[in-house]
């Protein structure tokens, strides 16, 4: 009897140590199964936001940091090949986006959506890692600057164009009321195109939005040099993926797919040099790329090379940022470098992999 107990204990020890070195493949949960069976990820985006998600008229391809993070999740699930054919981009207005997520019309929302307590707690949802730290700003025409306007404090009695269904609208009321004791005159529109048109046609004095959108709208306007973004910062707008909170495995997949892009930047792995790491003796890099026995992808129900697949197909965070956000006039070192890696003084930080 004693001998049987010793043998059983030894067996359990061997099994426990095996599970540390090589993870067991997790069963695919309901969302992962649904996406794999469908063969395509339904990803909700804005669709008309330069730098975040907008269709390139020459190639008809959806481009932007949000679009690329949809591809990141698709590459984690389907592998690196032909990722563009594995994402169905669903353009949604600010007002439509949460209903679309709740109705299952999209698996995931990556639509310059701000992480707030209210949304987190009241929409049966969770937010993934922040992919861009934004803040709300104000844009005016040069003539207002010429007349002495420098900040919101100089804008008593002004009217503000904003998009409905956004944090922007509510923050504007808070900031103005706090300063002047009365609510501001808001001119609301359903899309950013309509908001920009209202502003350009003189329906309001100030255009307010996430600063990234102000930069994008200014770059797309007919006369960018006539538009000035003031230094005021009205709010925190951490933007990132949002998904329903009923399937923790899918949430983990989205989170670690995003973290893979941060970690790759930290490790110096890009879409261009990833092949140079084949057979690497660096154990951290080997584990990250799925080249060792630990099999971290299996814990998520994915391939063990999911992180390598993402980097191969889409690139690391720096590549994604430089390709999409920098060209609309938001260099990585702007806003005190908040969107830099933590090692460069920013907030882009991934947890540990093992
Ligand atoms: N981040 C804020 C604002 C998001 C938002 O929708 N912003 C407007 C800025 S103008 C936008 O993206 N409009 C694009 C469109 O509807 O085409 C939120 O989550 O509420």
Image (tube, grey):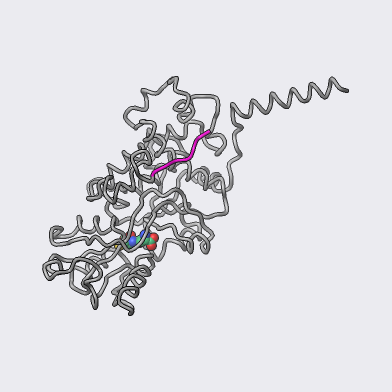
* The one of 81 and 245 positioned closer to us in this rendering: 245
| Residue drawn at 28 percent across, 74 percent down | 187
| Residue 144: image location, x then y, percent | 15, 69
Residue at the image point whose x is 38% and y is 51% from the top? 89
Placement of 342 over or under 146, stated as above or below: above
Q: Does 351 appear in magenta?
A: yes
| Front residue (pair 161, 250) | 161
Q: How many marks?
A: 0
Q: Position of residue 321 (x, y in %)?
A: 31, 43
Q: Is residue 154 magenta?
A: no
- Residue 148 position within the rendered picture, expressed as x and y whole percent measured from the top left: 14, 69
For the residue pair 234 and 194, the one nearer the viewer reads as 234
Check the image and report above or below for 24 versus 207.
Answer: above
Q: Nearer the viewer, residue 129 or 124?
A: 129
- Magenta segment boundaries in residue numbering: 348-354
Q: Quadrant of the N terminus?
A: top right
Residue 234, percent across and down? 32, 63
Vertical relation: 267 (above or below) 167: above
Instruction: Name the quadrant where ligand 1 sits.
Output: bottom left
| Residue at the farthest bottom position | 182
Residue 17 lies in quadrant: top right
| Residue occupying the point 63% across, 29% down | 19
Say left or right for 144 vs 342: left
- Relative side of 36 to 89, left or right: right
Left or right placement of residue 53 versus residue 329 in this view:
right
Taking the view exactly as shown, the residue that stands out farthest to the right is: 1
Q: Quadrant of residue 341?
A: top left
Q: Is residue 319 left or right of residue 206?
A: right
How would you classify the magenta stretch by its main secondary structure?
Answer: loop
């Amino acid at each position: 009897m004693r001998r049987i107990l010793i043998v059983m204990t030894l067996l359990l020890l061997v099994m426990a140590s095996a599970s540390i070195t090589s993870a067991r493949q997790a069963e695919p949960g309901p969302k992962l199964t649904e996406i794999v069976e469908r063969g395509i990820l339904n990803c909700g985006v804005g669709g008309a936001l330069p730098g975040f998600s907008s269709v390139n008229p020459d190639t008809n391809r959806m481009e932007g940091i949000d679009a690329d993070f949809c591809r990141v999740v698709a590459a984690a699930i389907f592998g690196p090949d032909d990722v563009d054919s594995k994402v169905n981009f669903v353009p949604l207005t600010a007002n439509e986006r949460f209903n679309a997520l709740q109705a299952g019309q999209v698996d995931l929302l990556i639509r310059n959506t701000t992480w707030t307590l209210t949304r987190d707690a009241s929409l049966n949802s969770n937010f993934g890692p922040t992919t861009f730290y934004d803040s709300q700003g104000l844009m005016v025409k040069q003539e207002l600057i010429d007349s002495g306007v420098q900040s919101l404090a100089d804008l008593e009695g002004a009217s503000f164009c904003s998009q409905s269904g956004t944090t922007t609208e509510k923050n504007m009321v808070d900031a103005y009321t706090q300063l002047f004791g009365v609510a501001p005159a808001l001119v609301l529109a359903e899309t950013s195109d309509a908001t920009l048109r209202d502003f350009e046609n003189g329906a309001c004095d100030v255009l307010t939005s996430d600063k990234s959108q102000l930069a994008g709208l200014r770059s797309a306007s007919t006369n960018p040099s006539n538009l000035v973004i003031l230094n005021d910062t009205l709010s925190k707008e951490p933007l990132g993926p949002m998904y329903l909170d009923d399937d923790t495995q899918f949430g983990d997949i989205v989170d670690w797919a995003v973290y893979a892009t941060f970690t790759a930047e930290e490790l110096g792995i890009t879409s261009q040099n990833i092949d140079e790491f084949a057979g690497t003796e660096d154990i951290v890099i080997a584990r990250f790329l799925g080249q060792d026995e630990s099999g971290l992808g299996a814990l998520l129900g994915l391939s063990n090379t999911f992180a390598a697949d993402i980097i191969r197909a889409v690139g690391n965070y720096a590549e994604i940022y430089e390709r999409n956000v920098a060209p609309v006039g938001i260099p990585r070192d702007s806003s005190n470098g908040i969107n830099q890696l933590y090692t460069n003084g920013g907030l882009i930080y991934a947890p540990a992999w093992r």
